[in-house]
Amino acid sequence: MASLAGKTLFITGASRGIGLAIALRAARDGANIAIAAKSAVLNPKLPGTIHSAADAVGAAGGQALALQCDIREEEQVQAAVAATVDAFGGIDILVNNASAIWLRGVLDTPMKRFDLMQQVNARGSFLCAQACLPYLLESPNPHILALAPPPSLAPKWWAPHTGYTLAKMGMSFVTIGIAGEFGPKGVAVNALWPRTLIATDALNMIPGVDPGNARKPGIVADAAHAVLTRPAAGFFGNFLIDDEVLRDVGVTDLSSYAVDPTQPLLLDLYLD
């Protein structure tokens, strides 16, 4: 399987950034994309809405469904999944991409921010999987892919931002659990994480980081495409790194993904 043509992807947080990049890569194959995100009205501080994303998916060759959906809300997720099935006849792939970030220490983390991260990252990933799995189990090649890091208990990753690390590791542990339960039933449940910083709006949350030290979202999108076109049977429980995935499929020159090839790349969080 080298193409996602005709496949239906439910992608959370796909109005911008990595989620949108994954949607556009699948759209080039002719895939159906459910864009499940909160942004229905343009925010001057953040580019992109579900509608602009849907237009971009259509222009790239895919079929798009713009779904305003807060993945903290069970009824909204269930309604978005039902609308996707009504529009496209099923769901083949869930991409758990949506994530909230707040890189501060304990004393500088309002509980409202702490709660938001746990509800979106870990709980939201669980909820979306729960809603999509009945349809994934009917797909001939079902995948769940989480944008989550390899699990780590190293204090250096927890001490600077316990709330965020708990939320992201929560996504990782949810992925482990779902893989353990549904991998043997034929669902490919895996996680993908970038080797380097990725130039998205989330990068602006990291003080003092120059986007020139990052790669473009396209590297994660291309790696996700390589993962999602693999046969699902027996492929689960892996924590994959984007450049390793691409090298495994023969892509060895990654220079085109650099925002500024003259600057050194910085590792992403949770990687040594």
Image (tube, grey):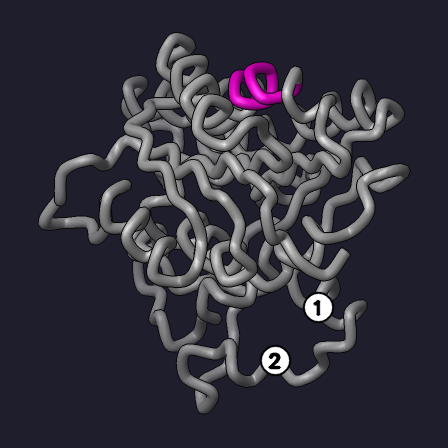
- Residue identified by numbered label 2: 254
State the residue lying farthest toward the top: 75
Of the 4 image quadrants, the one containing the C terminus is bottom right
Residue 202 vs residue 7, the one in the foreground: 7
Look at the picture and state if 109 lies above or below 8: above
Position in image of residue 180 (x %, y %):
82, 23
Mark 1 neighbour class, 10 Å CA radius: few under 14, some 14 to 19, many 20 or more: many
* Quadrant in the picture for residue 260: bottom left
Identified at 69% across, 37% down, the residue is 143
x, y percentage for residue 144? 66, 35
Which residue is tagged 1?
246
The image quarter containing residue 170 is top right
Local crowd size for mark 2, using a 10 Å CA cut-off: few (<14), some (14–19), many (≥20): few
Q: Which span of residues is magenta-colored?
A: 127-133
Q: Earlier in the sequence, mark 1 or mark 2?
A: 1
Secondary structure state at the residue bearing disc 1: helix
Q: Position of residue 120 (x, y in %)?
A: 42, 25
Q: Do the residues under discs 1 and 2 have CB atoms within 8 angstroms?
A: yes
Name which residue type carries label 2. Answer: Leu
- Residue 252 included in the magenta stretch of the image: no
The answer, for residue 159, to whether it is visible in the render is no
> Where does residue 240 sit, x and y in percent of width and height?
72, 51
What is the quadrant of the N terminus in the image?
bottom right
Magenta span: chief secondary structure: helix
In terms of image quadrants, where is residue 67? top left
Question: Which residue type carries mark 1?
Answer: Leu
